[in-house]
Image (cartoon, rainbow, N blue to C red):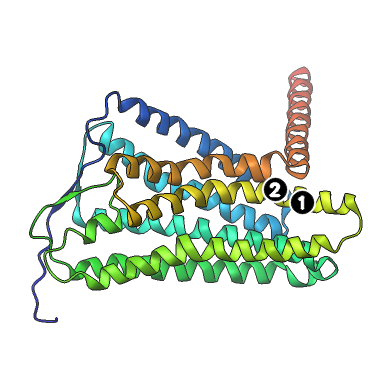
């Protein structure tokens, strides 16, 4: 392999949609989604950072999810709009690999952050008396750090193996971004390593996390069945509903698209729309569903606004008194 010369093109061409009328309205919709995603996740990040009462293990996980949602949308949507809305479909080889790396990195981190959230709910409901001794800041920080390092290594490996592929045929990527699958299928030499790493990435990001989440909720259901009080059961279920909604929003389109692609023919337009919504809609709804509507976060926002208003009143009074002196 060391003596093999690999053919690397200067640029790839992103095909995007096929013959869809008024497709620019879809890109304008994605622009709106991105703006709202930045505002929602930016607000949540600011509130968690500024309010010290939210510096807890649970909100460390929420902060990580909001940060990942913000970075993932920023890695994908602006470049997507530049590519198709302004018709800049050629992308440099090295930039294409970087594009693929960051999109899949943040997608994987989102997936496993939802697993850590499920773990938090599992400990809170199944071991309530030991929750604060198990779910600690160092423990959550270690889990998040390991997750980032592991997903980074996995995605870097998948991107690096594309350098062992020769592209001497078509350079048209049948996707809306530099997706790993459509890229390695363009190879004109042996791409078996990329095929295997693609399966590993799919299992790690799309298959294994929902199985773990399902397992935790089976344990939660068993624990709730043993609780005598109906009120306690309802209170515990309410704490899980928001998480289950964002899990469904994230994993159902992801799994549906990949299962359909593996079991039957899936039109490229359908695959692109499903993949686009999978990467853009969850970051938009996550802060709204899981955090911004909770009483704790709403009270924190209210306190910040109240403190800001008081500081403005105090500042205006000082300015008025100084003006009277002079």
Quadrant position of residue 214: bottom right
286 left or right of 205 in image: right
**Crowd tier of the residue under label 1, counting other residues whose Cα lies within 10 Å: few below 14, some 14–19, many 20 or above:** some
Q: Residue at x 82, y 49 (%)?
A: 234
Percent across and percent down for residue 117 are 64, 59
User: Is the C-beta separation of discs 1 and 2 under 8 Å?
Assistant: yes
Considering depth in this image, is 177 or 264 the residue closer to the camera?
Answer: 264
The local secondary structure at tag 1 comes to: helix
Q: Residue at x 12, y 57 (%)?
A: 9
Q: In this picture, is 274 found above or below 117? A: above
Q: Residue at x 50, y 59 (%)?
A: 109
Instruction: Measure how far apart labels 1 and 2 are at the Cα level.
Output: 6 Å
Q: Residue at x 22, y 61 (%)?
A: 184
Residue under label 2, please give it.
241
The quarter of the picture where the N terminus appears is bottom left
In the image, farthest residue toward the bottom: 2
Considering depth in this image, is 194 or 269 the residue closer to the camera?
Answer: 269
Percent across and percent down for residue 26 are 36, 29
In the image, farthest residue toward the front: 264
């Amino acid at each position: 392999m060391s003596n093999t010369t690999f053919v690397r093109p200067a640029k790839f061409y992103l095909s995007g949609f096929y013959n869809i009328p008024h497709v620019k309205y879809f890109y304008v919709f994605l622009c709106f989604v991105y703006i709202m995603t930045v505002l929602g996740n930016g607000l949540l990040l600011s509130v968690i950072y500024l309010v010290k009462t939210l510096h807890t293990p649970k909100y460390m996980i929420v902060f990580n999810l909001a940060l990942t949602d913000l970075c993932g949308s920023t890695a994908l949507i602006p470049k997507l709009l530049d590519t198709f809305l302004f018709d800049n479909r050629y992308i440099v080889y090295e930039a294409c690999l970087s594009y693929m790396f960051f999109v899949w990195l943040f997608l994987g981190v989102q997936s496993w952050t939802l697993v850590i959230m499920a773990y938090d709910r599992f400990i809170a409901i199944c071991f309530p008396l030991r929750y604060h001794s198990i779910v600690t800041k160092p423990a959550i920080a270690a889990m998040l750090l390991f997750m980032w390092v592991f997903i980074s290594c996995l995605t870097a490996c998948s991107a690096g193996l594309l350098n062992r592929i020769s592209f001497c045929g078509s350079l048209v990527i049948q996707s809306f971004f530099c997706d790993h699958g459509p890229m390695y299928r363009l190879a004109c030499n042996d791409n078996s390593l990329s095929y295997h790493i693609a399966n590993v990435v799919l299992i790690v990001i799309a298959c294994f996390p929902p199985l773990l989440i399902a397992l935790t909720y089976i344990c939660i259901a068993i624990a709730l069945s043993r609780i005598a009080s109906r009120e306690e059961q309802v209170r515990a279920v309410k704490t899980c509903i928001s998480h289950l909604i964002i899990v469904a929003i994230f994993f159902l389109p992801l799994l549906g698209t990949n299962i359909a692609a593996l079991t039957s023919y899936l039109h490229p337009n359908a695959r692109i729309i499903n993949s686009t919504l999978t990467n853009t809609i969850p970051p938009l709804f996550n802060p709204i569903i899981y955090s911004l509507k909770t009483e704790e976060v709403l009270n924190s926002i209210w306190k910040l606004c109240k403190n800001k208003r008081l500081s403005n009143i105090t500042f205006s009074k000082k300015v008025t008194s100084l003006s009277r002196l002079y």
